[in-house]
Image (cartoon, rainbow, N blue to C red):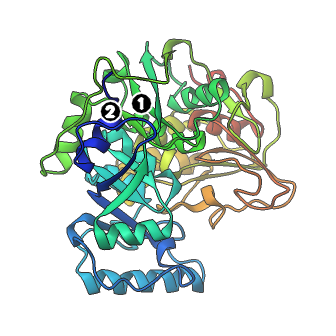
């Protein structure tokens, strides 16, 4: 039997002809991304050498600008590290700031066929670029930076063939919620996406899927390469690469077809996205206090456009705080140029600087006890966005925007469609 895309990437970077589920592989790391949490005084250990500074990226994203002394100290340690080892790919507070995974996409740091590691759990986001991208713990990150390699256990792969066409305002966030609700956990498994629908899906839409695969507990998530993907990377990074296609006889644990034409808006109920979604019509009218659009999954220009389409000519309910956070400052700038920010602010939204912000409950939108939020971000765990007695629902950017207008969970098709 042949190999899946992930198996071929891991084989290529570990110097093996074949790898299979159950194997342990030690492979070369093409890109290692350190972010501000890695430099926290309680975690950081002085690194005496860096294997290759050109393979290291340093990003401040979780609490930017620094919200307290701990985060300020972490960023100071990070700046000292960057200077010590002459790290050129550094994204400090300012014009180049943003969420690490979105910056990886903006700058083409994730090359097809390579391995990318980062200490954040949503590192699988970069798998959209046909690379093996995974979050690791701090010790493994330090090892990858100093030695240029890391290890993985090879898992079995689930293949999703995407067919048909999405009908706005339905988005890939709704498709993810369908997969999470229908198939549940993918723990110790890889996810591979392909199918005839790919040419019609933007890289932003695809990246929403790979990012959210962290919520399936997937090991790796990747897309089969196509011309859209290859052109996107080449426009941003001149470095050579070797994309990896799955073999025609690749051995999958399961192969599933998703018809995008049949998708509809869904809402994940609080505390988990696994087997926990309902059709938006079944929860319409549920009161909310806050609505959030942002994160590494849904802080793209596509998401700004979707929110602006719903909010144009409408007003946010006086009972709701609508917070919108771009994935990078560059996305913020593009949203300004397209007029999206003006539309959102006129409707009553607050648009923040690029950062993780409210998604992780770190700052810029923490919930109080008894409050409810509908979010287009990455997680809805209990206490994720604030007090453990708050509730977090999850929907698409269009669903979140519609809910902000109504003051309760709403179907975006009632406003645009």
Q: Left or right: where does residue 293 sit relative to residue 388? A: left
How many numbered marks, from 0 up?
2
Q: Is residue 321 visible?
A: yes
- SS at badge 2: helix
Q: Is residue 300 left or right of residue 316?
A: left
* Mark 1, residue position: 192
Q: Is residue 384 above or below residue 15?
A: below
Q: Position of residue 289 (x, y in %)?
A: 78, 50
Left or right? Give the position of 271 relative to 141.
Answer: right
- Return the residue nearer the eye: 262 or 345: 262
Between 31 and 14, the one nearer to me in the picture: 14
**Residue 407 locus on image (x, y percent):** 76, 40
Mark 2 residue crowding within 10 angstroms, few (<14) / some (14–19) / many (20+): many
The answer to which of 82 and 137 lies nearer the viewer is 137
* Tag 2 residue: 5
Question: Where residue 346 sits: x, y (%)?
Answer: 56, 48
* Residue under the point 49% across and 44% down: 219
Residue for point 62% across, 39% down: 401
Query: Where 64 sits versus 309, above or below?
Result: below
Residue at 61% from the left image edge and 55% from the top image edge: 359
Q: State which tag comes first along the sequence, 1 or 2.
A: 2
Note whether residue 112 is visible.
no
Q: Quadrant of residue 363?
A: bottom right
SS for dot 1? strand
Quarter occupied by the N terminus: top left
When the figure is inspected, residue 56 is found, relative to residue 231, above or below; the finding is below
Q: Residue at x 58, y 62 (%)?
A: 357
Which of 56 and 144 lies nearest the eye of the viewer?
Answer: 144
Residue 126: % across, % down: 38, 47
Viewport quadrant of the C terminus:
top right
Task: State how far apart marks 1 and 2 are (Cα).
Answer: 7 Å
């Amino acid at each position: 039997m042949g190999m899946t895309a992930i198996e071929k990437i891991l084989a290529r970077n570990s110097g093996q002809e074949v790898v299979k589920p159950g194997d342990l592989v030690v492979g070369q790391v093409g890109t290692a991304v350190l972010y501000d949490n890695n430099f926290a005084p309680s975690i950081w250990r002085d690194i005496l050498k860096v294997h290759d500074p050109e393979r290291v990226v340093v990003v401040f994203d979780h609490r930017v600008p620094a919200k307290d002394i701990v985060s300020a100290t972490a960023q100071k340690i990070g700046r000292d590290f960057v200077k010590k080892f002459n790290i050129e790919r550094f994204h400090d507070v300012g014009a180049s700031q943003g969420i690490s995974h979105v910056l990886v996409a903006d700058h083409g740091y994730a090359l097809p066929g390579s391995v990318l590691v980062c200490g954040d759990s949503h590192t699988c986001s970069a798998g959209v670029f046909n690379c093996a991208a995974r979050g690791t713990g701090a010790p493994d990150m330090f090892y990858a930076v100093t030695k240029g390699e890391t290890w993985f256990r090879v898992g079995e792969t689930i293949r999703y063939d995407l067919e048909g066409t999405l009908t706005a305002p339905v988005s890939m966030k709704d498709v993810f919620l369908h997969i999470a609700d229908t198939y549940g956990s993918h723990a110790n498994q890889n996810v591979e996406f392909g199918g005839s629908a790919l040419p019609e899906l933007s890289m932003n839409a695809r990246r929403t899927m790979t990012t959210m695969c962290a919520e399936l507990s997937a090991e790796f998530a990747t897309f089969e390469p196509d011309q859209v993907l290859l052109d996107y990377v080449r426009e941003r990074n001149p470095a050579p690469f070797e994309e990896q296609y799955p073999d025609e006889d690749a051995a999958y644990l399961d192969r599933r077809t998703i018809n995008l034409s049949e998708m509809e808006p869904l809402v994940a109920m609080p505390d988990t996205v696994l087997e926990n979604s309902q059709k938006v019509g079944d929860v319409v009218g549920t009161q909310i206090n806050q609505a959030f659009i942002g994160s590494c999954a849904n802080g793209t220009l596509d998401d700004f456009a979707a929110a602006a389409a719903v909010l144009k000519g409408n007003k946010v309910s006086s009972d709701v705080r609508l917070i919108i956070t771009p994935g990078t400052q560059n996305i913020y700038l593009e949203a300004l140029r397209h007029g999206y920010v003006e539309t959102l602010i006129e409707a009553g939204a607050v648009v923040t600087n690029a950062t993780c912000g409210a998604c992780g409950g770190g700052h810029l939108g923490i919930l109080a006890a008894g409050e409810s939020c509908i979010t287009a971000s990455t997680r809805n765990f209990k206490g994720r966005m604030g007090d453990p007695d708050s509730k977090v629902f999850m929907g698409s950017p269009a669903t979140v925007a519609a809910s902000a207008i109504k003051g309760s969970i709403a179907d975006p098709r009632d406003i645009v469609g």
